[in-house]
Amino acid sequence: MDKTLLVQRLMEVFLVEFDERLHAMSRDVLALETTESGTAERDKRIQELMRHAHSLKGAARAVDQPLIEESCHRLEEILSAVRRTPALLEQHLIQMLFGVLDGLAEAAKLLRKQESLEGSLLFGVSLEMEMFIETTIRPAAENRDQTSQKVTPPTSVSMPAVASPPARKSDPSVDGGPTQEALTVRIDTEKLDILLSRSGELLAARQRLRLTSDRLTGLSEALTSLHADWRRHTKTPGHAALGVPPSGAASSKSKSRELWEETPARLQALIADLERLRLSFREEWRHLDHTGAALDQQVSRIRMLPFSHGCVGFDRMVRDLARASGKEVELRIEGGDVELDRSILEGLKDPLRHLIRNAIDHGIEKPEDRKRAKKPVRGTIVASAALLGGQVEVTVSDDGGGLAVEAIQRRAKKLNLPIPTDHRQMIDLVFTESFSTAADAVSLVSGRGIGLDVVKTQIKALHGEVDAVSQEGKGMTFRLVVPLTLTLLRVLLVRAGQQTFAISNNYVHKLLRLRQTEVLWVGERPMILVDGLPIPLVPLAEVLALPQSPIKGWSGKRPVIVLKSEHRISAFLVDELLAEQEVRVKTLGSRVQRIRNIAGAGILPDGYVALTLHVADLLHRQGTMAPGTGSLLQKMRVGGESDRKRRRILVVDDSVTTRSLEKNLLEAAGFVVELASDGVQGWERVQAGGVDLVLSDVDMPLLNGFQLTQTIRKSDQFRTLPVILITSNDDEHSRERGLSAGASAYLTKGNLDQNVLMNLIEQFL
C-alpha cells in the first residue's frame, strides 16, 4: 500500500480514537471535581485518566504527533503525582486539566484540517503543565524524600508571559469535546454479524431465483418448439389449422396426425410445469422479499447511534455555564441507550444545546433564590429519550421557575401581539418567530422567548414537532418528537387536487368515509365528530392551495383522514386513499427554501415522486378546538349508547389502513375495538382477558394469522374464543389451511360484504 495512503488511513483511525478518549477523559475530570478526596471513586477516575492519557500517547507516537505525545506524557506525570499526593488535586489543578482537554480538542480540529499544531492552545497548556511539574510536583517529591510532613501545594503558579501564546477566552457554550464530525463511524460487531448473515440469505435467494430463471427458459423453449412444429405441419396444403386433420397415406399427413395426437399431452405437461413453476416462483419471491426487508432493516440499524452519543460534551457545557452564572446545576441523561438515525441525532444536537443553555441561563434560579423557594440548592436538568412507536420523544426539563407569565404578556403588548390568556397561547407565542426579546429586559426575566423559533425550525427540518409545558415555580419541560430515521418512512398515500401526497403513518389517527349529512356546521365552519368530540374538517387541497371540489353538496361517501399530534387534531377531506407503504424520503435540496406544509419528497416504487406533507404545519394551521365546543355539538349526535353490554373485538393487522377501516366499521356497529399490529401483540392482548372475538389478518410479521389461531386453540382458557380470519389470500389452499388451524370463519378482503361480516360476528357472539 502507498505510504501516503497508509498514513492517511492511520490518521483517520487515530482521530476516531482521539474523540472517544477525549470524551471519556472529560467525563472523568468532571467527576473528579465533585468526588471527595481519598474515596475509591476518585482513585478510579484518576486511574482511568492515566490509562487514557497513556494510550493516547502511544497512538500519537504512531502517527508522528510529538506535541500530543509530549502533552499526554506530562499529563501522566501530573496524575501519577496526584495518586501519591491527593492534596495536590485542588481547584487550580482541575482547571488546568480542563485546559488540557480544551487544547487536545483544538488539536483534533486542526489535524482534521491538516493544519500545524505549532502555536496552538495545546502548545501553551503543555508549557503550563511543564511549569507545574517543575515548580510543584518535583519540589514536593524532594520534600517527601527529606521529610514526612504533609505537602501543601501552592494555590497559584506564576507563568512567564513568553511561555505561552496569547490566552484564548473559552466559550462556555462550546462543548468540551471536538465538534467536527468524525470521518468514520465504529459499528457494533453484532450488527455486522447480523448484516453478514442476512447477506448470505439474500445470496441463497438469488441463486434459487437463478435456477427458477433457468426453468423458465426451458419452459419457454418447449413452448417455442411446440408452436414451431404446429405451424410447420398445419401449413401443409389441404390441412386445417384447427379441427381434425384430414386422413391420408402421405408422410406429411402421417406426421401431422401424430403431432395432432401428441399435442394435448404435451400441452398438459407444459401446463403442469408452468403451475409448479408459478408456485415455486411465488414462494421464492416471498422469501426474497422477507430477506430483503430484513436486510434493509439491518442496514438502517448500522446508521443508528445511542442518544447518549448526541449528548457528549453537554456535561462540560453545563459545568462551565453554571460556574459562569454563579449557579449549581446537575445534568442527567436518561434513555441514553435509545437508538436514533445518525442524521436525526446530529440534527438534535443544536436544539438540545440551546434548550439546556436556556435552562441554565434563565430557568434555574440562583442558590439563594432556590433556598427561599425551599428547593435544593443544586438545580437539575434532565435530557431524556424514549421510543414512541416509529418516533422518538426527547424531553429537556428543569426544576427552575417556569414561564414568567406577566413578563411575557408585557412583552407581547409591547410588540402589538395578541395577549396570551392561557397556557396554550403562551407556549404558542414564545415559539412565534416575531416574538424576540433579545434586547429587552423582559428576556432576562422570562428567558423563554429567545431563539425558540430557531429550535422549532430545526425540529421541523427533521420532520418533527416541538412543544412545551410550564409549571409556575416548578420548572419547564420541552418535548421534541422526531422520527427514528429519515431515510425510510411508512406513509399513507392520498390523492388531493389531482396530485399524490405522502403522510407519515405516525400521525394518522383514523380513516373515515363520510356522507355529506355527517358533516356538522358551526356557522360556516364544517366539523365532524371523532371519538365523541367535534374537530375541524377542511379539504386537503384547500390547505395546499390546489384545485378542489366544493365541500358542500357531494354525493355518496368521501374519504377523510384524521391527523393527530400531542395537542392538535384535525380532519382533512381527500379525493382518494391510495395505499400504505414504505418510501425512501429525500429532502428538497439546499436550493429550495422551506415550503410550508411540505417536509420532503418520497420516491414511489414506480419511480414517481410524491411530496411528503409536514403534519405539524397542517395541524398548526387548523389550530385547536375551543373549550366547550364539544359539549354543544355532542347534543347533535344521533342515537346513543345501547343498554346492553358492549362486546369487545380485537383487530389484529399489520396495516394501519386496514386497522383504521375495520375499527371504524365495528365502532359504528356499537362494539368496543382494540388493536394489535402483529400476532405477538394480539396473543398478549388475548391473554390479558376481556376479548370476546378476534378479527385477524393472515400475512403478518412475527406470528401470522394461522399461527395466532393455532396458539389460541391450543390454550385451555381461550380455545373457544371466536376467530375470524380476513385476508387477501383467496386461494383454496389458504382457505383450507385457515379452517384447519381452527378459524371460526375465513373471509377475503377482495369481495368482503360488510353485512356478511356483521352477521357472522353477531352469530359467534
Image: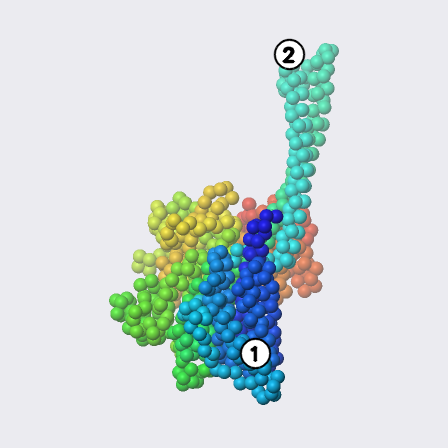
Q: Is residue 81 visible?
A: yes
Task: Classify 248 as above or below 680.
Answer: above
Front in this rendered view, residue 743 or 346: 346
- Residue 60: image location, x then y, percent: 57, 62
Residue type (three-letter) at the residue carrying disc 1: Arg
Residue at x 46%, y 59% (from the top left corner): 347
Place residue 468 in its image quadrant.
Answer: bottom left
Of 635 and 531, nearer the camera is 531
Q: Secondary structure at mark 1?
A: helix
Q: Which residue is mark 1?
A: 138
> Which disc, if any, is residue 237?
2
Which image quarter is the C terminus in? bottom right
- Between the residue at mark 1 and the residue at mark 2, the CA separation in whole angstroms equals 118 Å
At horizontal 63% and vertical 43% (from top left) the residue drawn is 285
Vertical side of 224 occupied by 642: above or below: below
**Can you tell which quarter of the image residue 426 is in?**
bottom left
For marks 1 and 2, the one nearer the N-term is 1
Q: How is the image coloured?
A: rainbow
Disc 1 crowd rating (10 Å Cα; few below 14, some 14-19, many 20+) is few
Q: Is residue 198 left or right of residue 139?
A: right
Secondary structure under tag 2 reads loop
Does residue 677 appear in the picture of this structure?
Answer: no
